Image (tube, rainbow, N blue to C red):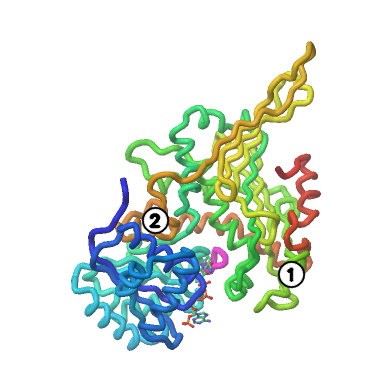
Amino acid sequence: MDLSVSESFSFILFGASGHLATLKLYPALYTLALKKRLPENFSIVGYARTAMDDDSFRKLVHDSILRDHGEVNEAKVKNFLEHVHYIQGQYESAEDFKRLAKALDEWERDPKAVRLAYLSIPPTVFTAVLKNLRAGGVHDGKHPFRCIIEKPVGHDSKSFAEIREELLSHFKDEEIYLLDHYLGKEAVRNIYYLRHANPILERMLKHTLIQHVEVTASEAAGIEGRAGYFEHTGTFRDMIQSHLLEMCALLTMQLIEEGESFRESRQRALEQLYLPSDAKPDDLILQGQYAKGVSAPGYTEEQGVSKTSRTNTFVAMKLFSHAQRWEGIPFYLRSGKRLTKKETRISIQFQMPKLSTPGGTPNRLDIILQGEAGMRLHLQTKLGGSTPQFRPLIMEDPLVCMGDCLPEHGLLLLEAIHGNHQWFLRFNEVRAAWILLDPLQEHLDGKKTPLHLYPAGSGGPKEADAWMKKDGRTWF
Ligand SMILES: NC(=O)c1ccc[n+]([C@@H]2O[C@H](COP(=O)([O-])OP(=O)(O)OC[C@H]3O[C@@H](n4cnc5c(N)ncnc54)[C@H](OP(=O)(O)O)[C@@H]3O)[C@@H](O)[C@H]2O)c1
């Protein structure tokens, strides 16, 4: 069923001048309008400190849409931009928020319009905005209200707990939407639904058959001008915390029965992930940073990055799950920037058959979610001759979204307007992820912990290969 919105709403975007807003949010909202998913009565209200009026803000939104869509129908964009407004204000000023609330009342023309406040700002200004949403009357108790926060929520379990407390002191749990945009990707959702819809696949996923699992999210791009965000985050917090752990959860969670909560099951799967207590940190994690490559600068040469930065742009780590069917199976997670190609993939390597298969290699299932998306099953087939020799047989099919496909942020926004939390994170999920990763982050922060350099455009640090070899394996 196509998801669309019939009730009126206001989308209030704090940090409207920023990177995430211009890169992702305006193009996603425009796509929803283009696909006729939005009601007649809606407002998109940008709020930021940057001096702009409605016209200059509309130009910024227009340019962002054009950059993303390539070509646009100007009449349709013009129509969309009529819903777009801008309020210049300070995040700390209750008076400015009162102005915002007054303007919303005028634009909405509907006392029941849903109000969504999207915090696309650095966490340092979260507290002020949360406080002023109430103090300024944007959250007035009359309009249904949603507060959307992008991952990573906090930078460790302690800061996460503070943000959680702050959020819950202003809003009800059901008004809060913690957004991990990977959970808006159809391909990522499909990790669960492939299992759900294919009992033969589901039956294969158990520790008695599997040797190990590899989860890779590699990017060819660098930090794309996001030094402000990335310097304080790094790949470990940006990619592993949330994106890759959520992928592991979707792979390992119990398929839910009628009436059970999907989010509870996903949370339980995350809580079951663990690091073996007897392992040394260096055996569990390795970090790297891209250096100058043939055609790209090194990380410390990027604009806004400190020359002495030790921020990781590559991480490889190992974890396990207590879920009964996954007990003892190592999960190798790997993510990096400025690698050879963009690809997000889960590879499941099965055990070698008990009988000898000369020339054979273990069965493997690749689920490629981004890049050249597809499913690939590696089987073995006999070569001709009187003695059994084997060669690989690869069954492969593209795995692209067909049907009602929306950009990740667009889909999540529609679901938030509808009040559907299923693909938003629970506080306890985020908490479980930080608790799992805190000791490793502490290790990575250590001045003596190695940061392995790799040339931009390469396959990552060579030390990551040696690290994997210690376990008797190679990356796929
Ligand atoms: N960028 C991404 O791809 C990405 C990915 C995942 C999560 N996130 C999260 O999404 C949020 C927005 O990220 P972003 O990359 O769009 O951030 P950004 O571009 O650095 O900042 C967004 C806006 O916030 C305001 N701002 C920046 N620094 C500020 C400061 N020190 N004090 C007060 N206001 C400040 C600026 O607007 P004005 O100066 O005009 O007020 C800026 O345009 C953050 O919470 C980030 O953690 C971003």
What residue appears at the point 33 percent right and 65 percent down from the top-left corner?
A: 146
Mark 1 is surrounded, within 10 Å at the Cα level, by few (under 14), some (14 to 19) or many (20 or more) other residues, namely: some
Give the amino acid type for the residue marked by disc 1 in the picture: Gly
Q: Picture coordinates of residue 268 (x, y %)?
A: 48, 46
What residue appears at the point 80 percent right and 45 percent down from the top-left corner?
A: 470
Cα gap from disc 1 to disc 2, whole angstroms: 35 Å
Give the amino acid type for the residue marked by disc 2 in the picture: Leu
Q: Picture coordinates of residue 417 (x, y %)?
A: 31, 61
State if disc 2 and disc 1 touch (CB < 8 Å): no
Quadrant in which the C terminus appears: top right
Q: Picture coordinates of residue 149 (x, y %)?
A: 44, 66
Mark number displayed over residue 298? 1
Q: Secondary structure at mark 2?
A: helix
Q: Picture coordinates of residue 177 (x, y %)?
A: 39, 61
Eyeballing the image, is 391 above or below 290? above
Eyeballing the image, is 137 above or below 351? below
Q: Secondary structure at mark 1?
A: loop
Q: Is 314 situated left or right of 66 in this image? A: right
Q: Nearer the viewer, residue 392 or 92?
A: 392
- Check if residue 278 falls in the magenta segment: no
Q: Which residues are magenta?
A: 154-159
Quadrant in which the N terminus appears: top left
Mark number displayed over residue 411? 2
Q: Is 331 situated left or right of 185 in this image? A: right
Q: Nearer the viewer, residue 364 or 397?
A: 397
Residue 246 in view (yes/no)? yes
